Amino acid sequence: MDQSAEKHSGLRLISRLAAAVLGGYALASAWVVMCGALGAARVEGVLGGVQSSWLWYVAAVIWAFSPVAPRRVWVVLGGATVALLGVAALLTSVKG
């Protein structure tokens, strides 16, 4: 294997690690925010979101190391995070 292929492979691993850690954290945090915006009692919604957010985080970590291209992992994790935050903002604005 030549050096350029090894560098490329190393960058892909770093990208996957960053997607797993940072993207998973962002997705889990967006889930908690959305759960807080769902219910009438915000405390219970946030607590339920925190208790279940580890599922989203673990799923993101596992998926980040799947054979899917790293760019696709970043796009899907970013899109899902933005979608959850958008739903939370919509729910907050509707409730008033």
Image: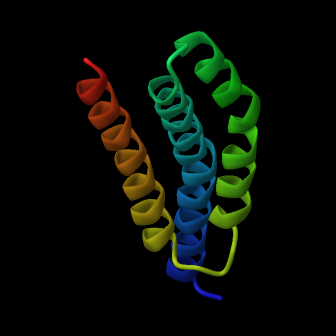
Q: Pinpoint residue 36: horizontal percent, then vertical percent.
A: 51, 23
Viewport quadrant of the N terminus:
bottom right
Q: Quadrant of residue 60?
A: bottom right
Question: In this rendering, is residue 46 above or below 8?
Answer: above
Is 4 situated above or below 36? below
Residue occupying image coordinates x 55% and y 53%? 19
Residue under the image location 51 percent in, 70 percent down: 70
Colour convention of the picture: rainbow
Dividing the picture into quadrants, the one containing residue 48 is: top right
The residue closer to the viewer here, 32 or 95, is 95
Find the residue positioned furthest to the bottom.
Answer: 1
Residue 17 horizontal/vertical position (percent): 63, 53
Nearer to me, 14 or 55? 55
Which residue appears at 59% of the width and 73% of the height? 9
**90 to 81, vertically: above or below:** above
Tell me which residue sits at (67%, 65%) in the image.
63
Quarter the C terminus occupies: top left
Residue 37 horizontal/vertical position (percent): 44, 26
